[in-house]
Image (cartoon, helix red, strand yellow):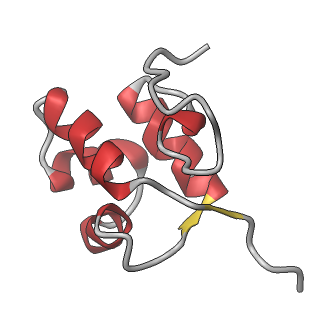
Amino acid sequence: MPPTPTIRQNGAALRQFREDRGLSVTDLAHLAGVSPPSLRNWELENRALPRTKASRICAALSIRVDAIDRDTESVNVQVAS
């Protein structure tokens, strides 16, 4: 089985986008279909964020994945295209 593709997330940016929208960890986790403990670990950068989960979280936040991906140049992109 091939490894799950992950992104090198910027947990602080992820947390800031969530807080800017007035969402709790539980709120965003519910909207994105992930568990609150997993979301907290991704914000704290304790665990790698799978690309599929990043896509769901970013869709819930109306941002592009590259807005929270340390490996992209566009860390300030906020609007999903």
Q: Residue at x 53, y 50 (%)?
A: 54
Q: Position of residue 26 (x, y in %)?
A: 18, 55
Q: Position of residue 48 (x, y in %)?
A: 53, 73
Residue 6 appears left or right of 80? right
Q: Where is the C terminus found, in terms of image quarters?
A: top right
Along the viewing direction, whichever of 36 and 51 lies nearer the viewer:
51
User: Total marks drawn?
Assistant: 0
Q: Residue at x 33, y 44 (%)?
A: 13
Q: Is residue 22 above or below residue 51?
A: above
Residue extending furthest toward the right:
1
Q: Where is the N terminus found, in terms of image quarters?
A: bottom right
Q: Position of residue 71 (x, y in %)?
A: 64, 50
Q: Is residue 39 above or below residue 47?
A: above
**Could you say which quadrant of the image residue 35 lies in?**
bottom left
Q: Is residue 33 above or below residue 68?
A: below
Q: Residue at x 17, y 29 (%)?
A: 20
Q: Residue at x 26, y 73 (%)?
A: 37
Along the viewing direction, whichever of 80 and 33 lies nearer the viewer:
80
Residue extending furthest toward the bottom:
1
Residue 69 appears left or right of 13? right
Q: Position of residue 52 (x, y in %)?
A: 64, 54
